[in-house]
Amino acid sequence: MDSAVPIRQESEPRLAASVSRWLVRWRTPLALLGLLLGLFGVERSRQLEYSRSIASMFDRNDPAIIPFRRLGRTFGANAAVLAVYDDAELFSPVGFDRLSKLTQQLAAVPGIGSATSLATTPLGRSIIATDTNPAAARLVQLMEGYTVGSDRRTAAVVCVLAGGAEADDGVPGRGDTIDALREIMQYYPSGTVAGETVMLRDGFAMLRRDGNLLGTTAGLLASVVLLLLFRSLRWLVAPLAVVLLALWSTRGLLAVAGQKLTMVSTMLSAMVTVVAIATVVHIIVEFRRRRADGEPAEQALTGALTQLFWPIIGAIITDMIGFGSLIASRVGPVHDFGVMTVVGAGMVLLAVALAIPWFALAGRLGGDPGRVWGEGKLDGGLDRLVGRIVQSPGPILAVAVGLIGLAAIGLTRLEVQTDFIQNFRAGSPVVESYEIVESRLGGAGVWDILLPAAEPIDAATLARVAALEARLRADVTAAGGTTGSGLTKVLSIADLLETVSPVSLANLESSAVGSWMVTAAVGLLRQQLPQLADSLIGRDPADGSTWLRVMLRARERQPAAAKRQIIDQVRSLVTEHFPATGRQPAGEVTGFFVLLAQLVERMLADQWLTFLLAAGGIFLLLSFGFRSPVIGAIALVPNTLPIVVVLGLLGWWGSPINMGTAMIAAVSLGLSVDSSIHYTTAFRRRLARDGAIRAALETAHQTAGRAMIFSTLALVVGFLALTTSGFMPTVSFGGLSCLTLLGGLIGNLVVLPVLLSLAASRFGWGG
């Protein structure tokens, strides 16, 4: 038979009482210590930096990141900014001079390593004579999609940033460089800047604003709700103080540890707010109940802390288990978010100990939380809910099982959002910039093939490259099977030499003289146009190997399945034409387009791993704490229900999973199970006292259940602040958190009591 002991209640009651008395007795020194800790956190948190590199989102040993790092080392390829504008006179002397002047102006911007455009080609001004100069016509056609649009009026200057892609995290002034480019381009018709670096820079600037504003706003909104509920300024300030102390001390510790903020770090403030508000509300409700029974304030607070001591510790530990499961993720931002939130949850426990005793007892004005408007009706409603639960447990359980079954089918229909631009609100500058690239320059999906080569580059090597490119143009298909439409552009050194050479490379392949001519042409190109040559032929400084680069362009606005199809086809062709040999490695496919197509998919796969780890860890903790595996299993059910239902509905609606959505399962489980611990503890305590199941349910509803309602209401209002973000994963995380919090409330007020009452009857817990 299962024991009827709530978490640690009988084993160590003296410890809870002793610690509670100590916290109340030394409340003033502890509050001063909390103030010093908060000031330390504020000062240290100024040193926190953001990790802006796309490579930092993957594990260093991830197979997908190795060629991407090689691309950055060898070509500096992922540190480029595209400056684009509209010019109807582009192919006239006036338009060419305008482009040439702009190219020189952009190249002179501090932080720019090189600038390439139609004005920097070997043909000079004669490039505009496409009607009379066949070489110019071929070269312009070759550069379509990179430095000129097919409309022949969209001009682009490719600006390579100094420092390379690997320096994205640490180059000072890189944001200033992008701002300077943007300042110049605003004087040109439809002038804008685009590129992966620009998108990441704008995204992180938005996230920095969100992190500073939305986290504070969420805490303020939640505290204002508590003010309206309890009508006490003291109990407005107290939870807000806990939130701010926990948040700033967490940020300070992260700064000391050298941790960098990531693309999902904005949600750290929200997680700290949830844990803090939920914990403080349970203390408020129990303290208010004791004061209503006539206990003196100091005695009431000591008693409340003693009674809630182990439930609060158990709830914080379950939060840490839920958050900590994210550390197992292979995706960098999710892993780091797990570390940050574990630290944050621990700091909430410390902040409660340092701040609440002093705030609860300081002064005499407004010490007791007031009754909530309409709370009398809430009392009756909770009692009636208990009556329905006792009368109809079977139908309630059947509805819950039906919802889980229906939603589970929707889980199989979940899709991932691989279009990174969808992470920003429509109409934002970064979206408008990418719309121009997508519509006028052949697609915003930029990626590359790296092909190993031996020096010197000969005709046979370039012929192999040309043969691969021919297959890429002809055989790679988009969704629907439209031949040749999967890639909008394919460009390599073979295309460049083919364009300027009077003889086809295929005719030079088998000739010694032909190979000599190709080698000489490559050498001449490196001398006269080193920037262009270095973008197509590079040496990896890590091992000295030579690589040829094939630049690809594809449409970014495609479903995840279509992107996977295109990438798989390209990989297959590269492996066929450039397989690994004893002397050389195989060709590699990489780039921003490839990584982002994999990123959220891996997050989704990791979501179920982290969810299982969280569920397993929480089950073990609850089973040990309550000394009952039955209770451990029961507590998981009402908290799993809203997660499955919400994600299942997303699958049914066809709403793609983004970075914010992909973390919701493990995080929500860790958060909502807090209420289950408090409810189950209150239920088992009353049940052990008089053995009446209905009375135990009524007590749990009127104490822990009441606190759940108040805290959920405050948190849902607070989380609405996240839905105003310009970064859509933050919006999704905020909205889905509201839904899962509400679902967890329903589960803990309806499903959990049903399961507890059935288990109590089955195992004879009521005596």
Image (cartoon, rainbow, N blue to C red):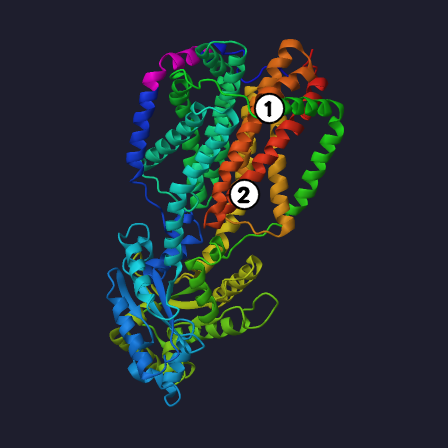
Screen quadrant of the N terminus: top right
Residue 728, above or below 226:
below
Residue 56 shown left or right of residue 406 in the figure: left
* Mark 2 secondary-structure assignment: helix
| Dot 1 amino acid type | Glu
Residue lying at 46% horizontally and 13% vertically, measured from the top left: 16
Which residue corresponds to the image point at 28% horizontal and 57% vertical from the top-left?
163
Which residue has dot 1 on it?
375
Does label 1 or label 2 sit earlier along the sequence?
Answer: 1
Which residue in the structure is indicated by mark 2?
735
Q: Position of residue 199 (x, y in %)?
A: 40, 57
Image quadrant where residue 179 sits:
bottom left
- The answer to if 23 sits in the magenta stretch is yes
Q: Residue at x 38, y 90 (%)?
A: 132
Question: From what the image shows, is residue 475 above or below residue 411?
Answer: below
Tell me if residue 182 is in the magenta stretch: no
Circles 1 and 2: CB distance less than 8 Å? no
The picture places residue 205, in percent across and down from the top left corner, at 37, 50
Position in image of residue 77 (x %, y %)? 35, 62
Which of the two residues, 16 or 356, is positioned nearer the viewer here?
356
Circle 2 crowding by C-alpha within 10 Å: few under 14, some 14–19, many from 20? many
- Mark 1 against mark 2, which lies toward the viewer? 1
Label 1 crowding class (10 Å Cα cut-off): few <14, some 14-19, many 20+?
A: few
Main SS of the magenta part reads helix
Q: Which quadrant: the C terminus?
A: top right
**Considering depth in this image, is 509 or 329 the residue closer to the camera?**
329
Q: Which residues are magenta?
A: 17-30
| Residue 20 shows in the view | yes
